[in-house]
Image (cartoon, rainbow, N blue to C red):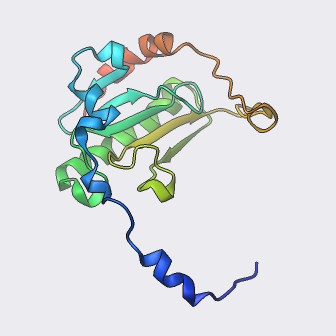
Amino acid sequence: MEYVYAPWRGGYVRKKSGPSLNEADPNDCVFCQKLKDADDAGSFILRRFQHHAIFLNLYPYVAGHIMIIPNQHVANLTDLSPASRQELMELTTTCASLMQQELHAGGVNLGMNLGRTAGAGIPGHLHMHVLPRWHGDTNFLPIIAQTKPISMDLKLVYQDFKPLFDAIKV
């Protein structure tokens, strides 16, 4: 790998542009709106906890893709209380284990994108992605046809997952 020294880029990299991610309006946040809604099944909320809720992702990379979303509208991990950060890690650990034990996933992808530049689609409200993965669950369609097949109906996934997530003890 080659490296190019470009000190003139430093000003651009350090420059703050646009509103702070913490200033994003919770009234415009899709996660905040769904958290306010009492219809958990309609919003695909699998379970609510003291600091977080577990959602099925409406635009999953693979069947069973869930998100752990803070009840509080925050953009950065440092904005969470220590108790909330602890609950986030406990839920992440439990969900990853559940994917492997109950869904027989061969692996699990965990991740969050903090900030628009990191790829966050909703940069004002952080969230942890938990994706079950199986050998062979990728294919060529996204590359040649810009199409991502999801082989399961979200309502059926919700019905199958709900009892599993109801049993979580954190």
Q: In which quarter of the image is residue 98?
A: top left
Q: Is residue 167 visible?
A: no
Residue 39 placement (x, y as % from top left) = 26, 14
Asked if residue 56 is positioned above or below residue 17 in the image, the reply reads above
User: Which residue sits at x=82%, y=35%?
Assistant: 144
- Give the residue furthest to the front: 18
Q: Quadrant of residue 164?
A: top left
Asked if residue 36 is positioned above or below residue 28 in the image, the reply reads above
User: Which residue sits at x=73%, y=33%?
Assistant: 146
Asked if residue 56 is positioned above or below residue 2 in the image, the reply reads above
User: Which residue sits at x=68%, y=23%?
Assistant: 149
Residue sitting nearer the eye, 34 or 8: 8
Residue 87 placement (x, y as % from top left) = 25, 44
User: How many circles with numbers are drawn on the protein?
Assistant: 0
**Viewed as shown, does residue 26 lie left or right of 149?**
left
Q: Is residue 54 visible?
A: yes
Residue 166 placement (x, y as % from top left) = 30, 20
Q: Quadrant of the N terminus?
A: bottom right
Residue sitting nearer the eye, 30 or 19: 19
Q: In which quarter of the image is the C terminus?
A: top left
**Viewed as shown, does residue 27 lie left or right of 163?**
left
